[in-house]
Every structure is written in structure tokens, then in C-alpha cells.
Image (cartoon, helix red, strand yellow):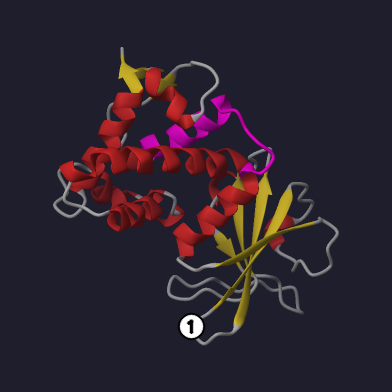
């Protein structure tokens, strides 16, 4: 399916009209990944876009509040990661506290060239003193973990999320799910662990648990992009 922007493009801050293609068998997760990259290509960007989007990304992924600071690439406090050798983008540190009140730090590496590829959104632990890199856990966030982010999907999500929540606020009386439930579902759409075939059921309208959410988001995309 080829879709063209309609008058709702202003809500996404898009600066020009261009084609966007979805395949007939694309589920919502696949559509979402294509759409946020498309938004980034066509959006008017501001200097603060990355910091705003990084903070939002952390809160969606990990549900923790804290403070964000941008670091220079030569900052010696940045841990060493196998995945960031020769990195030349932007680095951010998100400072927060765990349930015990202990200070924690999560580092975000934002690549303006979008070369992280399939590593986008994935977490990595720093190298230890022997140069080894231990695995992350799906149940626990370690101190000084890093998240690799392609700038296109980072900023594209920030813009789309804002526009989608505005649409929900206008029509929330038409749906049974709450804004919190919608936000929780959006956290699945930005989680790289959801990309596998075994998770496809979460992104189909026929799903009993998520069907209404899929219908709302898919319907919103269809209202922004007219099928030709």
C-alpha cells in the first residue's frame, strides 16, 4: 500500500509530502518502524530534539524518573562498550535511583548516521577490567548500561507519540482503554525484543488483549496517510 500525507501532517510537524509504502502483511510493529523513520526524514527538527526524545525513550522503556545530561565524547566518565568503538555521535547520561534509593546511570548513544542498525534500542553492559562484556537481563537494569539509538527512529517516535496522545485526548471517550494503557502499549512498539515472529500476536487487531489498541493506532495512521 502506498500512502500520502493528508492535512493531519501538521500534527506530526512534517515539512514535505512523500510516499510511504507498507506491505499487505505488515503488522503494526513493522508499520510503526517504517513510519517513525519516515517522519524523521520529513520533519522540521530542532536542536533540542535529541535530549527531549532520549528522556522520553528512557521513561517509556524503563518507567523511571530522573535527570538527563549531555556529555562530550571525551568525557572520561563514559564507560567503555564494545559497540561504541569509534563512535562519533551524541552521548547522554540519565541519572536515576533504583528501588533501594541507590544512584544509577544509563548511557544513551545517539547516532545521527543511523548506523546502529539492528542494535537500535538494545541494551549493553560496559566492559569489565578484563575487557569482557556480560549480558544484560530482561528482569533487571544494571548500573552504567548503555542503549544504542539511531537518531531517525528516536526523533520519529518522539514526534509520533506526541501527536498520537493528542488524538487520544480528543477521542478518549470513544475507547475503553486508558492513556496509561496506551503508553504501556507504545513501550512495546519501541522494544527491540518485540521484533521477533513469536511476538506478532501482540500487533494484530484480532488479538483479544491488544485488539482495540491496534485498531486505534492503525486507524490513526490511516487517517494521517490516505490509501491510494
Query: Is residue 36 located in the magenta-colored stretch of the structure?
Result: yes
Task: State left or right for residue 218 relative to residue 108.
Answer: left
Task: Name the residue beneath numbered marker 1.
Answer: 99
At which x and y percent is residue 178?
25, 54
Q: Is residue 23 visible?
A: no
* Residue drawn where x is 32% and y is 37% of the image: 167
User: Is 201 within the magenta?
Assistant: no
Q: Residues within 10 Å of mark 1 (few under 14, many from 20)?
A: few
Query: Which residue sits at x=53%, y=80%?
Result: 98
What segment carries the magenta color? Answer: 30-49
Q: Position of residue 207 (x, y in %)?
A: 17, 49
Secondary structure at numbered mark 1: loop
Which quarter shows the C terminus? top left
Placement of 143 over or under 193, stated as above or below? below
- x and y percentages locating residue 76 in the rendered image: 84, 67
Magenta-colored segment: predominant secondary structure: helix
Amino acid at each position: 500500500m502506498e500512502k500520502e500525507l493528508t492535512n493531519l501532517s501538521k500534527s506530526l510537524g512534517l515539512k514535505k509530502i512523500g510516499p510511504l509504502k507498507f506491505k499487505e502483511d505488515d503488522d503494526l510493529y513493522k508499520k510503526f518502524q517504517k513510519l517513525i523513520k519516515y517522519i524523521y526524514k520529513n520533519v522540521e527538527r530542532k536542536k533540542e530534539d535529541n535530549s527531549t526524545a532520549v528522556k522520553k525513550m528512557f521513561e517509556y522503556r524503563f518507567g523511571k524518573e530522573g535527570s538527563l545530561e549531555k556529555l562530550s565524547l571525551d568525557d572520561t566518565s563514559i564507560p567503555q562498550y564494545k559497540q561504541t568503538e569509534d563512535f562519533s555521535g551524541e552521548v547522554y547520561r540519565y541519572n536515576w535511583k533504583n528501588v533501594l534509593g541507590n544512584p544509577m546511570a544509563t548511557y544513551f548513544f545517539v547516532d545521527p548516521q543511523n548506523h546502529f542498525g539492528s542494535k537500535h534500542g538494545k541494551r549493553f553492559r560496559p566492559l569489565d577490567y578484563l575487557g569482557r562484556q556480560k549480558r544484560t537481563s530482561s528482569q533487571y537494569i544494571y548500573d552504567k548500561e548503555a542503549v544504542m539509538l539511531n537518531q531517525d527512529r528516536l526523533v520519529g517516535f518522539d514526534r509520533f507519540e506526541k501527536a498520537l496522545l493528542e488524538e487520544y485526548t480528543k477521542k478518549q471517550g470513544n475507547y475503553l482503554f486508558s492513556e496509561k494503557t496506551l503508553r504501556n502499549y507504545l513501550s512495546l512498539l519501541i522494544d527491540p525484543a518485540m521484533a521477533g515472529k513469536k511476538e506478532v500476536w501482540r500487533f494484530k487487531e484480532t488479538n483479544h488483549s491488544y485488539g482495540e489498541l491496534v485498531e486505534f493506532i492503525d486507524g490513526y495512521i490511516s487517517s494521517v496517510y490516505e490509501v491510494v
